[in-house]
Amino acid sequence: MNFLLGDQRTADDLEEMAGGDEAARVAVCCPEGDLDTCTVSAFREGAAALCGWPWVIFDLSRLTFMDSVGLGALIGAIRRVREAGGQAIVCAPRRPVGRLLRTVGLDRIAPVEDSLEVTLRRIHTAS
């Protein structure tokens, strides 16, 4: 599970798009492989550490599988980010994970974008 903070460049244009503005500080959570019963505790622990950041991106581009336990952990992490005053965005889900997110209506809970670059532009526009 990778947890990349804005000062560790998650994309070449992260700093430029965030503009160095405090309100545009970005943390990126990029789980890899499966998010399921076996891996959910590591995800919850890492995601909890991101609370307090103004923007948290859950980049699902490397996630190959998510079960209901993983989905619940993602929804819980989004909720905790919001409760701490931050904004959460989900991006780049692969086909099976994206289908699950659409089926349960996750886009009504948090924005779901196609790519990290689109997400960074959204943050830059909002800041």
Image: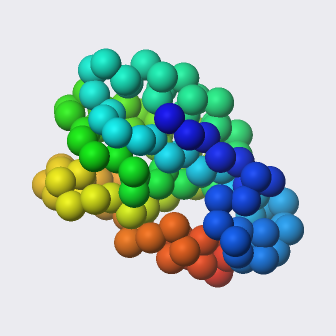
69 vs 85, left or right, is left
Instruction: Please say if 95 is above or below 43.
Output: below
Residue 91 picture quarter? bottom left
Q: Residue at x 55, y 74 (%)?
A: 117
Q: Residue 8: x and y, percent?
A: 76, 52
Q: How is the image coloured?
A: rainbow
Q: Residue 69: x and y, percent?
A: 26, 27
Q: Viewer-proximal residue, 88 or 41?
A: 41
57 vs 115, left or right, is right
Q: Residue at x 28, y 46 (%)?
A: 64
Q: Residue 68: x and y, percent?
A: 20, 32
Can residue 108 be seen?
no
The quarter of the rendered structure image containing the C terminus is bottom right
Q: Residue 32: x and y, percent?
A: 41, 41
Q: Residue at x 28, y 28 (%)?
A: 36
Q: Viewer-proximal residue, 90 or 64?
A: 64
Instruction: Please say if 19 is above or below 112.
Output: below
> Number of labelled discs?
0
Can residue 24 be seen?
yes
Q: Residue at x 78, y 77 (%)?
A: 16
